[in-house]
């Protein structure tokens, strides 16, 4: 299977090396991070085709990284003579019977390994045309991909074509369903791949039998005689309506049905689920790679759960690479499979503690990807703390944390440690805002001592043990008059105020969040905001 991919000047990747495991790989990242590009690059290297068209016939201008294109144009304008940027995709494969003839060192890493190399570069045959092109330097505003050629070889330097590449892939993009009359082309291809040669022959024979049966039907014969009698005699030949027997392929006429309902009018979720399951049903001996783009699209929670269980069961004997934005997908299939795509790398979470992996897998409702995708995170103990932190940040910066890529996540009890285990592996800036519960040394410092050695993790708590939670902290930081005004109450004592706030945590926090009055925040919350600025 695919061990790793090297990308150079391809779409958004200037120079990236991503490593994959043999089984399941879950690729996550922010929008525009290149998740779809990775899947498309793998498919392109294995097929030589981009959206069912051979790349050698037409290289899109936007394939060259924008930075590489700008650098090339700037160098030409400065009077230099740079080589046009080279586009490179390399797949490093595992040793197997189907890759034994692909071993060599024809790759950028000079590894003696089996693999596939697709490179687009200036074609020497267009030397004169290219020289004339760069001679007018002021007219050079883009990379002249029209003068490129695409070389598709294995690492043994043998040229490749669709017949010589024995490792194949199914790219399943759940967001783009392309339907035609009958079975859509995409589904036809998956069904064809899932059927044996004998099954395809029997299907073709059965289809031809139906063609012949149509022509001999008495009612059809009567209709044809009537039609022939009505036509103007512009020809001596007989006009009839019959099935076109010159087209022996069944794909254009036979349509799959789901519970007797034509596939193309079924719900989008059912269509996507069927395509994924058909791809997974392909024979293992075909050395098949499954590439799935956001399987959660169009699926309800229960349907997605069923689909993920089937993917998990099927991927043990084949390689599956999934992109997703769904925490449920990540938690269900396992955080140990997670690859975080950031810039030109994709670190894995393979060393995450087993109990933490099991924790998130069993509690898929937790927003794991909020921590994975955020620039920084504040972990708080409940929704009331979350609202107060949102207000504190808004007061200081006149904008909400999420506008700066900072996510405030409500966690409870020991679950904070699970998120910190993730933060350690991702080296994610994380602030823990903890109640001291009347003993900050034992309840906070000792509890989080395993994370004290990480510069990107800060534990914020108050040393005032007599103020054990957020509510007495707020009451102590502000006057009784201010808090009464904010809450719309008339408490005569701080004790009554704290009792009310402790019994109505979320309602009071919401009023604090929306208050027009200035609110003084406890020192440990100010410390948390300071920690985010580091």
Image: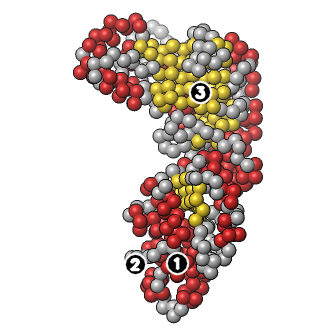
Query: Residue 207: horizontal and vertical position, in percent?
Result: 66, 21
Q: Which mark is residue 5?
A: 3
In the image, is 433 to the left or to the right of 489?
right
In the image, is 88 to the left or to the right of 503?
left
- Could you tell me which secondary element the residue under label 1 belongs to? helix
Could you tell which of marks 3 and 1 lies nearer the N-terminus? 3
Instruction: Name the quadrant of the N terminus.
Output: top right
Q: Residue at x 75, y 23 (%)?
A: 285
Q: State whether residue 372 is above or below residue 477.
A: above
Q: Residue at x 52, y 78 (%)?
A: 474
Query: Residue 260: horizontal and vertical position, in percent?
Result: 65, 40
Label 3 near label 2: C-beta < 8 Å?
no
Residue indicated by mark 2:
517
Mark 1 or 2, closer to the camera: 1
Rate crowding at label 2 as few (under 14), some (14 to 19) or many (20 or more) other CA atoms within 10 Å: few
Between marks 3 and 1, how big is the CA–CA gap?
53 Å
Could you tell which of marks 2 and 3 lies nearer the N-terminus? 3
Q: Residue at x 58, y 65 (%)?
A: 460
In the image, is 189 to the left or to the right of 486?
right
Mark 3 or 1, closer to the camera: 1
Q: State whether residue 124 is above or below residue 370.
A: above
Q: State whether residue 302 is above or below residue 461.
A: above
Query: Residue 5: horizontal and vertical position, in percent?
Result: 59, 27
Residue indicated by mark 1:
474
Rate crowding at label 3 as few (under 14), some (14 to 19) or many (20 or more) other CA atoms within 10 Å: many
Label 2 near label 1: C-beta < 8 Å?
no
Q: Residue at x 28, y 10 (%)?
A: 132
């Amino acid at each position: 299977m695919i061990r790793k991919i090297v990308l150079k000047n391809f779409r958004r990747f200037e120079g990236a090396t991503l490593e994959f495991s043999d089984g399941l790989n879950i690729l996550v990242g922010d929008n525009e991070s290149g998740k779809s590009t990775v899947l498309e690059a793998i498919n392109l290297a294995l097929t030589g085709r981009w959206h069912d068209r051979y790349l050698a016939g037409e290289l899109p201008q936007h394939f060259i990284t924008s930075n590489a294109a700008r650098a090339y144009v700037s160098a030409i304008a400065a009077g230099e003579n740079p080589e046009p940027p080279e586009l490179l995709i390399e797949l490093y494969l595992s040793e197997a019977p189907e890759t034994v003839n692909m071993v060599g060192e024809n790759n950028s890493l000079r590894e003696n390994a089996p693999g596939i190399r697709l490179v687009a570069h200036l074609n020497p045959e267009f030397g004169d045309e290219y020289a004339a092109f760069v001679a007018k330097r002021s007219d050079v505003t883009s990379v002249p991909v029209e003068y490129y050629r695409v070389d598709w070889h294995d690492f043994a330097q043998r040229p490749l074509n669709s017949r010589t590449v024995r490792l194949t892939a199914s790219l399943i993009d759940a967001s783009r369903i392309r339907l035609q009359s009958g079975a859509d082309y995409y589904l036809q291809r998956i069904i064809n791949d899932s059927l044996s040669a004998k099954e395809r022959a029997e299907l073709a024979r059965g289809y031809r039998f139906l063609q012949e049966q149509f022509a001999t039907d008495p009612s059809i014969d009567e209709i044809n005689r009537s039609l022939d009698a009505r036509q103007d005699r512009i020809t001596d030949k007989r006009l009839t309506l019959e099935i076109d027997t010159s087209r022996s392929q069944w794909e254009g006429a036979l349509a799959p049905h789901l519970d007797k309902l034509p596939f193309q009018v079924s719900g989008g979720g059912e269509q996507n689920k069927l395509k994924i399951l058909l791809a997974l049903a392909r024979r293992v001996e075909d050395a098949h790679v499954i590439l799935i783009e956001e399987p959660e699209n169009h699926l309800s929670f229960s349907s997605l759960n069923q689909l993920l269980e089937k993917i998990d069961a099927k991927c043990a004997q084949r390689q599956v690479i999934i992109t997703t934005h769904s925490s449920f997908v990540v938690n269900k299939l396992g955080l140990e499979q997670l690859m975080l795509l950031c810039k030109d790398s994709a670190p894995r979470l393979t060393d995450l503690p087993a109990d933490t992996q099991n924790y998130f897998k069993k509690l898929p409702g937790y927003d794991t990807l909020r921590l994975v995708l955020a620039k920084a995170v504040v972990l708080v103990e409940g929704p009331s703390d979350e609202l107060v932190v949102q207000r504190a940040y808004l007061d200081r910066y006149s904008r909400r944390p999420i506008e700066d890529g900072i996510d405030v996540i409500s966690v409870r009890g020991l679950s904070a440690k699970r998120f910190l285990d993730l933060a350690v592996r991702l080296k994610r800036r994380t602030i823990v805002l903890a109640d001291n519960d009347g003993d900050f040394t034992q309840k906070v410092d000792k509890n989080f001592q395993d994370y004290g050695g990480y510069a990107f993790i800060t534990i914020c708590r108050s040393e005032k043990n007599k103020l054990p939670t957020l509510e007495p902290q707020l009451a102590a930081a502000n006057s009784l008059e201010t808090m009464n005004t904010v809450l719309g109450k008339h408490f005569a004592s701080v004790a009554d105020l704290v009792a009310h706030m402790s019994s109505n945590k979320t309602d009071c926090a919401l009023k604090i969040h929306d208050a027009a009055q200035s609110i003084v925040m406890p020192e440990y919350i100010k410390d948390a905001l300071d920690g985010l600025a580091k």
